Amino acid sequence: MLTEKELKEYCAGARENYLAHISIDCVVFGFHEGLMKVLLLEVKDEGEWYLPGGFLLKKEPIEMAANRILKERTGLDEIFLQQFHVFGDPDRSKQHFDMYKDMIAPEENWFTNRFLTIGYYALVDFCETNPAPDQFAAKCSWRDLNDLPELKLDHALILKTALDTLRLQLNYQPIGYNLMPKEFTMPELQKLYETILDKKLDRRNFQRRMLGFSILTRSDQPRKGGAHKAPYLYSFDLENYKAALTEGFKGGW
Amino acid sequence: MLTEKELKEYCAGARENYLAHISIDCVVFGFHEGLMKVLLLEVKDEGEWYLPGGFLLKKEPIEMAANRILKERTGLDEIFLQQFHVFGDPDRSKQHFDMYKDMIAPEENWFTNRFLTIGYYALVDFCETNPAPDQFAAKCSWRDLNDLPELKLDHALILKTALDTLRLQLNYQPIGYNLMPKEFTMPELQKLYETILDKKLDRRNFQRRMLGFSILTRSDQPRKGGAHKAPYLYSFDLENYKAALTEGFKGGW
DNA sequence: AAATCAAAGTGTATTATAGACACAATTGTA
DNA sequence: TACAATTGTGTCTATAATACACTTTGATTT
C-alpha cells in the first residue's frame, strides 16, 4: 500500500501523462522444467497477485506501451506480443481500490476511474527474464500455471482468455520460438505442447507432424551428458517459421 | 458538415456522456444476391464513407454499446457481434477533422481527441435491415465488398482486418446462421462461403463437408418455381450450430 | 566387462478426411 | 419432345491422422 504522498503524486503524474480510461494488462507465458509459468506481481502487504500492466502514454502506440511495460517487468526487448481482447466491464475494478478511500477523494484517485484494459499475451524465454516489481508490488515472480494464487480484479478471466487464445493459436501457427532456448530436443518441444494443451501427445506422431511443418533444423551434434540415449538438438528455421506465422498451417477451406 | 452550433452542442454532450478516448467501429457484413455487402455511411457533403460507429457511455459495457450502435443503424437487435481488434495508432484520426478548426478550438473539439477504437464485426441478414444514417451522415447503405468507396480514417484497415478475421473464423466455426434467411438451398449456402473466401468450391465436396458438421436440417419440401431442378431447402439446427460455435470444428491437436 | 535401465530414434498398417471427377434426375422453355 | 440449366448423388485417389512396437544408445550398476 502506498503512502498518501506517494498516491497523490502518482495520481497527479498519471493524469498528466497517461491516456484516461485505458490500461494494458499482459499475460506473460514462460516454460521451465516442464511447467508452464506465468509472470505475476504480488501486491504489497496483501496476499493478492495481479498481472503485469500499466497505462498508455498520451501519444504512445498501444503495442509500444505493451512493450515498454514488459521491458520494465522482464528486462526483455522485442518480446512476442499479441493483443487478444479488451476487457471493459464497467464494474471490473469496483471496490478494488477502496483501501485508499480515506487518503484521497475518489474523483482525485486515478485508480477509481473506469478502465478498459487491453489484454496482450506474451511468450518469452523463461531463462532470459529478470522479473522486477512495479511500484505497487512487493515482488514480481514466475508462478506455475496450474498452481495459481488468487488474482485481483478480473485478472483470472484475462489469464484464462489468454490461455484459450494461445491454445487456439496452436492449431494454425507455429509456437515455441519465443518459449524455448535456441537449441532444444524434440521431446522438450513436445513437452511444451503437452503443457500448453494439458494433454499427452504421441511421440512419433508429434515428431512427424512437427517435422512436416519444415520449421525445424536438426543439428549435427546430439546433446551429450544426459543419463540416456543422446537426443538430437533442433533449432527453429527462422525464415520458414516466420512464413508459417503469417501464412498459417492449414488451409481449412 | 455540421453547423457551429450543432458541433458545439454535440461536443458538450459527448464530454458529458461518453467515456473519453474510446470509440467503437463496426464492420457489418451482409449477403445479398450472391454478393458480400458491408454497411457504410456517407459523410454529409463529401464523397467519403465510414464504418458505423460511436462512443461508449460512461457506465456502459462495451458489448452493449456495440449493440446499441448497430441497432440505431440497422434496426436489428441481438446481432451476432464479435470484438476482433483495437486500433490505437496515435495518428489514426489526425487531420480528419481539420474542417472544423475554424468553428471550435481543438481542445474543445471532441473529435480531435485521441481515440482508441474497438473493432467489432457483425453478421446480419441483409433483408432484415433498415439502414439509417447517424447525424454526421447523409446516408447509410449497403455497399459491395468488392467495390468499396474510399473510406475515412483507418476504416479501410479496420474493414480488411475484420474480413481476415472472418475468413480465419470459417476454419473452426460454423457461419451462416446470421447471414442467411431461415431457409436456404445448399447452392445458396455454398455461394456464401465462396463469396467470403473469394474462391470457387466444389459443389459435391462442399455438400459432404457441410452435412458432416451436422448443423443442417433438410426440409421435406424442395423449393419449387425455379427454372430448373427443384433444390432442397435447409435450415440450421440451432442446437448443434451453437454447440459447434463454442466447441469449434476441428481438434487440430 | 557385462547386464540393465531409461529415454530416444524410427516405420508401418489402418483409418479418416480432403480432393478430383462424371453421370443421372428434374424442371421450364423452345 | 428435345434442350438447357441446375441440382442431386457416388466413387476413386491421395493425403493426413492415428495407433502401435521394436531397436538403438549411453550411463549406471554389479
Image (spheres, coloured by chain):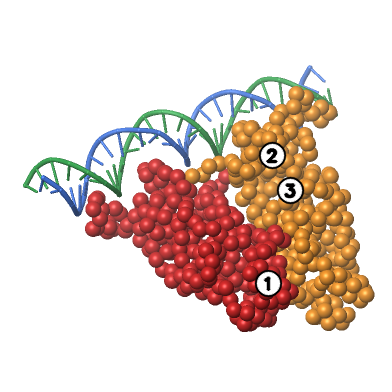
Chain colours: A red, B orange, C green, D blue
- Subunit of label 2: B
Q: Residue A159: x percent and y percent?
A: 56, 57
Whole-Å distance between the Cαs marked 3 and 2? 20 Å
Q: Is residue A74 above or below residue A169?
A: below
Badge 3 marks a residue whose secondary structure is strand
Q: Residue A181: x percent and y percent?
A: 38, 62
Badge 2 amino acid: Gln
- Is B123 placed left or right of A236 in the picture? right
Which quadrant: the N terminus of chain A?
A: bottom right
Badge 2 marks a residue whose secondary structure is helix
How many other residues sit within 10 Å of disc 2, few (<14), some (14-19) or many (≥20)?
A: many
Disc 3 vs disc 1: Cβ atoms closer than 8 Å? no
Residue in view at x 73 percent, y 48 percent: B80
Badge 1 amino acid: Lys
Answer yes or no: is residue B32 visible.
no
Disc 3 vs disc 2: Cβ atoms closer than 8 Å? no
Q: Are marks 2 and 1 on the same chain?
A: no
Residue, disc 3: B80
Badge 3 amino acid: Phe
- Subunit of label 1: A
Residue, disc 2: B190
Residue, disc 1: A101
Answer yes or no: is residue A196 visible.
yes
- Is A223 placed left or right of A118 in the picture? left
Q: Are marks 3 and 2 on the same chain?
A: yes
- Subunit of label 3: B
Quadrant assignment, res A53 = bottom right
Q: Are marks 3 and 1 on the same chain?
A: no
Residue in view at x 85 percent, y 73 percent: B11
Whole-Å distance between the Cαs marked 2 and 1? 60 Å
How many other residues sit within 10 Å of disc 3, few (<14), some (14-19) or many (≥20)?
A: some
